[in-house]
Image (tube, rainbow, N blue to C red):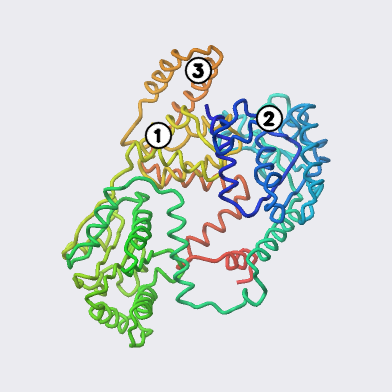
């Protein structure tokens, strides 16, 4: 079932990434689909390439069949010498699937070489086998205490190298085979080369030169770009919420003087909803000046002074005000109020201030003394603030004494959750099958958009499809909305009884049997959103290095206004 969409997903993703194509080929030829798109479809050309893997079809669609792509294609072929160091039971993870696959991949690589692409192929980039990296997320969940301690003792650094592997008995080797994945090292030079080649191609395509990269940026334009990128990130996947969008549009079109306050719990989608509204409304009303400000989108955006300075500067530039924008907070408050009253009656302006609760608490910003109580009827203010029952927000208390229009953000509907699940994998050409989608959405925590998106991002980067079922079953479950997992599994078994193909039916039942124990061991928690982020943090520590992950997250938590990549590196290396 899941395979029916894989090829279309992959080929459509290639189209979305043009004009560049980056091909990294190892030794595996890849999965050969049984069914190809209909001849009448956009990818009907694949009917002439039966027996070819998705990987080869991607290369053909991305480059070989598109002469205009030859100047934009970069290929890197891996040197297979490291294979001899991989333990025999795990070599199938990196070696060709069959003799036929070896021949097909060899022919494909030779065809790429013979094409004579302008950008030279990197043929045989080196790497080394470093060991088997343990997937602790699954291992800790499954292993008994004795086995877990034995593996932790051997894999203190997260890896089981060949020396350590040789010391294991057969029982522990089987555990390492089950939870370990082949990990390669010595790829730093390869990564640098990929980056340089791709950046060079991008510079040539966009006709960039060194001078253009050193031009001093416009501070106002630079700050604006932060908010534009923030909105873009929130709108990569946005579905539903039509009633919320309609309420916002009605408010923006209306004549009410008090502002609008959008509220919702952590991760409920307030920022995404306001980003969607800002873009949609501006496109539909080009005569209206829409000014969105997302607190937290940039290092300066959490400062009351910097926020007011940006709002005043944008209004001055857009509306042609002649007054200077002062540097201090008190003067900025006065100027902001003056600018609001000076906006011409025939010019509609929509101001969006998202996440007021994230403003720095200095200067008593949460008291909202700086915010006018009412606005001219042609100037609309839309704000948002978090509203969690277990925390008291000063911003909300400050709004209690103000006239306002309240718009609460509701949980995702079943239809909206399903559509998000369909869209997110599209970003990486991965899809979940019906059982996996049903298992994921049976968890009530997925009614929270942030929780659902984090879960899907975790699955996007999860390497083993065979383990995806159980990874979904391990996601945190809310105490206040417990799911009857025994009933859920029983219902799926009942559905499977209607499957005509006995082999398919048995595969489905076997998957349910593997899922059920994981579900029964997964204890519900009070705050699933926090717990899923804890799972992410644990994964980062396992995949990289616990000390590095802890240092980076500690620095990020301690930083008042965020940190740039360069600042992170300087702090980690002791240069700051």
Q: Place residue 100 in its image quadrant.
A: top right
Residue indicated by mark 3: 509
Q: Nearer the viewer, residue 513 or 289?
A: 289
Quarter of the C terminus within the rendering: bottom right
**How far apart are the two marked residues, 2 and 3, measured between alpha carbons?**
24 Å
Point out residue 260 in the picture as x, y percentages from the top left corner: 23, 61
**How far apart are the two marked residues, 1 and 2, measured between alpha carbons?**
31 Å
Point out residue 227 in the picture as x, y percentages from the top left corner: 43, 65
Element class at badge 3: helix
Element class at badge 1: helix
Residue indicated by mark 2: 177
* Mark 2 in CB contact with mark 3 (< 8 angstroms): no
Q: Which label's residue is closer to the chain start, 3 or 1?
A: 1
Element class at badge 2: helix
Residue indicated by mark 1: 441
Residue at x 66% of width, y 29% of height = 32
Point out residue 514 in the picture as x, y percentages from the top left corner: 52, 23
* Mark 3 in CB contact with mark 1 (< 8 angstroms): no
Residue farthest along the front direction in this orientation: 40
Q: Place residue 179 in its image quadrant.
A: top right
* 406 shown above or below 159: below
């Amino acid at each position: 079932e899941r395979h029916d969409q894989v090829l279309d997903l992959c080929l459509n993703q290639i189209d979305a990434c043009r004009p560049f194509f980056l091909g990294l080929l190892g030794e595996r030829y890849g999965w050969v689909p049984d069914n190809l798109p209909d001849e009448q479809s956009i990818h009907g050309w694949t009917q002439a390439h039966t027996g070819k893997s998705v990987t080869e079809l991607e290369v053909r669609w991305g480059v070989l069949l598109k002469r205009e792509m030859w100047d934009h294609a970069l290929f890197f072929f891996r040197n297979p010498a490291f294979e001899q160091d991989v333990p025999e039971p795990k070599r199938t993870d990196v070696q060709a699937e069959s003799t036929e696959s070896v021949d097909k991949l060899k022919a494909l690589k030779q065809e790429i070489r013979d094409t004579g692409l302008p950008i030279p192929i990197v043929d045989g980039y080196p790497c080394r086998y470093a060991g088997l990296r343990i997937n602790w997320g699954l291992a800790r969940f499954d292993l008994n205490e004795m086995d877990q301690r034995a593996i932790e003792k051997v894999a203190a650094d997260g890896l089981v190298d060949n020396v350590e592997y040789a010391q294991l008995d057969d029982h522990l080797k089987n555990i390492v085979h089950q939870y370990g994945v082949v990990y390669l090292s010595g790829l730093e030079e390869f990564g640098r080369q990929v980056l340089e080649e791709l950046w060079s191609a991008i510079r040539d395509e966009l006709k960039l030169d060194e001078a253009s990269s050193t031009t001093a940026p416009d501070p106002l334009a630079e700050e604006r770009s932060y908010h534009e990128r923030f909105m873009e990130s929130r709108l990569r996947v946005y579905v539903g919420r039509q009633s919320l969008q309609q309420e916002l549009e009605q408010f923006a079109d209306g004549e009410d003087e008090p502002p609008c306050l959008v509220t919702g719990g952590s991760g409920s989608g307030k920022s995404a909803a306001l980003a969607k509204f800002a873009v949609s409304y501006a496109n539909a009303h080009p005569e209206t000046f829409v000014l969105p400000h997302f607190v937290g989108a940039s290092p300066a955006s959490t400062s009351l002074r910097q926020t007011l300075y940006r709002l005043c500067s944008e209004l001055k530039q857009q509306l042609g005000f002649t007054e200077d924008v002062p540097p201090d907070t008190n003067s900025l408050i006065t100027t902001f109020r003056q600018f609001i009253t000076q906006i011409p009656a025939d010019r509609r302006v929509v101001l969006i201030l998202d996440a007021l609760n994230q403003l720095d608490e200095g200067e008593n910003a949460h008291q909202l003394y700086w915010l006018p109580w009412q606005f001219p009827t042609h100037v609309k203010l839309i704000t948002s603030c978090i509203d969690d029952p277990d925390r008291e927000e000063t911003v909300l208390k400050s709004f209690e004494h103000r006239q306002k229009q309240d718009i609460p953000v509701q949980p995702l509907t079943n239809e909206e959750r399903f559509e998000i699940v369909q869209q997110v994998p599209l970003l990486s050409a991965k899809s979940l099958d019906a059982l996996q989608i049903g298992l994921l959405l049976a968890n009530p925590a997925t009614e929270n958009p942030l929780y659902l998106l984090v879960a899907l991002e975790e699955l996007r980067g999860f390497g083993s499809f065979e383990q995806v079922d159980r990874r979904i079953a391990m996601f945190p479950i809310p105490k206040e909305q417990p799911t009857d997992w025994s009933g859920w599994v029983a219902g799926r078994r009942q559905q499977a009884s209607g499957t005509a193909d006995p082999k398919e039916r048995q595969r489905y039942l076997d998957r349910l049997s593997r899922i059920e124990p994981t579900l029964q061991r997964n204890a519900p928690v009070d705050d699933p959103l926090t717990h899923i982020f804890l799972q992410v943090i644990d994964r980062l520590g396992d995949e990289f290095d616990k000390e590095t992950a802890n240092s980076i997250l500690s620095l990020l938590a301690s930083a008042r206004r965020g940190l740039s990549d360069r600042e992170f590196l300087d702090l980690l290396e002791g240069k700051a």
